[in-house]
Amino acid sequence: MAIVVLVLWFFTAGAGFYLLVTSNLGRARPAVPEPAAPQPATVTQAAAAQPSRREMRRATRDRWDPPSLTAAKNAPMIPGAGSVLEFAHPACALIGLGFWLGFTLVHNRALGWIAFGLIAVTACLGLTWVAVNLRAARRGAADQSAQRFAGRLMIVHGSAAALTIALAALSALVARG
């Protein structure tokens, strides 16, 4: 079963690597978004510029918010978390993969549990990365600083990671040594 987990871990790593390659992560992000030049509006653009009922309710509710609350709502969930997570999630996954490879070769329970702990930390970092990106995307759809990932592939990567965690725990539990 340890070999199945190893193969599944490699599959998950491959899906994650493909996610990184196909995302906008490698593209240059503007430090400050440039304002668009005003253009004459057509009738359809004027109709599309009307705020939705949801936006109007939110504006009515947020009208009395003090400036500090408005700034807190618009601030990133964890300042600078994107860069840290871009490094930490793959790094923990690769280190855990190395420990799991060692566990697969020698069946030492300690290596298996270290690998399981690292994969659990990796999953938490990945979920935090998703939450940070979703909040950034929600905060400003026009903001180019939010990373964009392919939805289906992200689901495949997350599902494979969840299965890897479950099988890694089961393998470490039943390992002899």
Image (cartoon, rainbow, N blue to C red):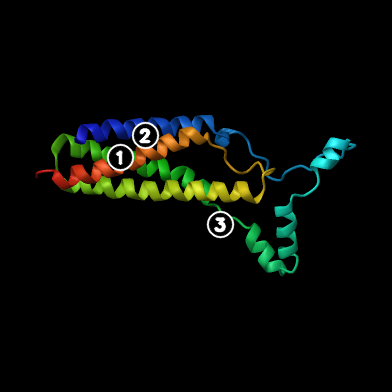
| Category of crowding for the residue at label 2, using alpha-carbon neighbours closer than 10 angstroms: few (below 14), some (14–19), many (at least 20) | many
Q: Are marks 1 and 2 in contact (CB under 8 Å)?
A: yes
- The residue most toward the right is 40
Q: Is residue 59 above or below residue 128?
A: below
Residue 164 — which label? Answer: 1
Between marks 1 and 2, how big is the CA–CA gap? 8 Å
Q: Is residue 27 above or below residue 174?
A: above
| Category of crowding for the residue at label 1, using alpha-carbon neighbours closer than 10 angstroms: few (below 14), some (14–19), many (at least 20) | many
Q: Nearer the viewer, mark 3 or mark 1?
A: 1
Q: Quadrant of the N terminus?
A: top left
- The three-letter code of the residue at mark 2 reads Thr
Between marks 3 and 1, how big is the CA–CA gap? 28 Å
Looking at this view, is 104 or 56 the one in front?
A: 56
* Image location of residue 102, percent across then percent down: 20, 38
* Image location of residue 136, percent across then percent down: 60, 49
- Residue at the location (31% across, 40% down)? 163
Q: Are marks 3 and 1 in contact (CB under 8 Å)?
A: no
Describe the element under mark 1 as helix, strand or loop.
helix
Between marks 2 and 3, how big is the CA–CA gap? 27 Å
Which residue was labeled with disc 2?
Answer: 12
Residue 77 — which label? Answer: 3
- The three-letter code of the residue at mark 3 reads Met
Closer to the chain start, of discs 3 and 1, is: 3
